[in-house]
Amino acid sequence: MKKYLSILTDMESKIQEGQYRSGQKLPSVRSAAQSYGCSISTVIRAYTELEKRHAIYSVSQSGYYVVQKDGDSDNMDKSLIDFASASPDVNVFPYLDFQHCLNKAIDTYKYHLFTYSDGKGMDKLRQTLVSHLADAQVFTVPDRIVVTSGANQALEILAKMPFPNGKSVILVEQPSYNNYLQYLEAEGLSVIGIPRSTAGIDLGALEDRFKTGNIKFFYTMSRYHNPLGTSLRMEERKAIAALASRYDVFVVEDDYMADLGSGRGFDPIHAYNQTSHIIYLKSFSKIIFPGLRLGAVVLPEALLEGFHAYKKYGDTSLLSQAALEIYISNGMYERHKQKIYSQYEARMQAIDSAVKRYGGTGLVKVVPGDGGIYKLFELPQTINLERLIKRLKMRNILVMPGKLFYLSDYLEREKFLRISISRARLEQIEKGVQAIVEEVKREEGNRW
């Protein structure tokens, strides 16, 4: 068994047995590495997997904590305003609907659900995903779809497997998805960054990287970017698709936030590419349950054999796949998507209103968006971010600093806070934003 898996198993056992209680802080990465006799990167990988399984969560500049159990909800600190966590709001999980789908799946498929699964995923689910993805302008066939244990599994396989273009460098936006950046660096893979701002991406610089950088693939989030919260303009998506074809560079389009926006009229990069250079990723964790751990990847023909060689076997629950298929095909998924979007959109609008109300626009700049769960609070470069976060924490407000979303050696960093609304209650948002604006003004005042 790989070392990180043994650590993962041990940690899960200790949590289940109560050795680590709900809300308790876990050992630091460094002390855990010493205790288990392994590298820091191995512990980070185990902790990241525990986060994926919704067993623990991280708090910026504090550490990792055990997720609160349902029975312990009365002990939760109601005064805490959590703008840091990206996990879905437990209060909108579709428990009863999905339980119905689980029962229906068992009645429909019976003993077939308790055998080994195909590495590609359940046939019926992949067939259903063809029409589901077509609604997002991703047109494909079942054989090109692979069901994965969350989108992260696909990202990890793609990072390690060889590509037919024979290139080796992974190009990532800066800033970008922090867990993936951490994984790439921990694995010692060749990775470089290219700037992306709330205004978009420099297509000239991107073309130069594609042309001269030995780029294996370019990882991008075309809409509701983490942490920027913004989406690429149509001309940018079209240009990226054309550049991929021209320079034989693959594009990994992570559309994990696709269901948390107005959606209509948005064609992903995949829709514009005619040479099969786009790999499209879809996640279901942000809509249903993080613990469901189901995602899908749409692969070009040239990558299928290599991807299956690295995936090798079916490692996602057939029961979960069958329940998801029923959940999508009977319309429950679409109804739940609209419910979550309306709730999250109200929270996003509340942030915009609060920033305007408390006069933060001079120092705190918030970029308008039309979906997702992230808002970027752009800050003056003169702000002492560490001190600001400490002050906010003293006021029971958790935020994520922008520096976590960059490669460790990337120097051209912007100063910002990533604000997530998925765990912040609507009635908390005004108070939380007011406190952030006050502390930013206080920090600026201390300079003079």
Image: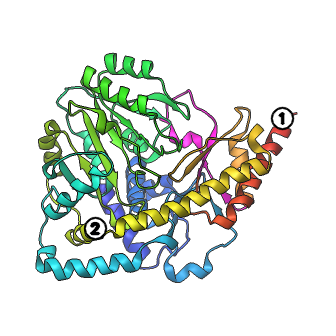
Q: Residues within 10 Å of mark 2 (few under 14, many from 20)?
A: many
Quadrant of the image occupied by residue 160: top left
Q: Which residue position is annotated with label 1?
A: 447
Measuring from the top left, give residue 170's x and y in whole percent. 33, 31
What are the residue bounds of the magenta stretch?
A: 395-419
Quadrant of the image occupied by residue 304: top left
Q: Say whether disc 1 or disc 2 marks the residue closer to the N-terminus.
A: 2
Task: Pick the residue in front: 83 or 340.
Answer: 340
Can you name the residue that lies furthest to the right here? Answer: 448
Q: Residue at x 71, y 34 (%)?
A: 380
Measuring from the top left, give residue 262's x and y in whole percent. 47, 52
Number of numbered discs present? 2
Q: Residues within 10 Å of mark 1 (few under 14, many from 20)?
A: few
Can you name the residue that lies furthest to the front here? Answer: 265
Q: Is residue 46 left or right of residue 326?
A: right
Task: Pick the residue in front: 174 or 271.
Answer: 271
Q: Which residue position is annotated with label 2?
A: 324
* Numbered disc 1: secondary structure: loop
Give the amino acid at mark 2. Answer: Leu
* Numbered disc 2: secondary structure: helix
- The label shown at residue 229 is none
Q: Residue at x 24, y 55 (%)?
A: 131
Measuring from the top left, give residue 290's x and y in whole percent. 40, 64
Give the amino acid at mark 1. Answer: Arg
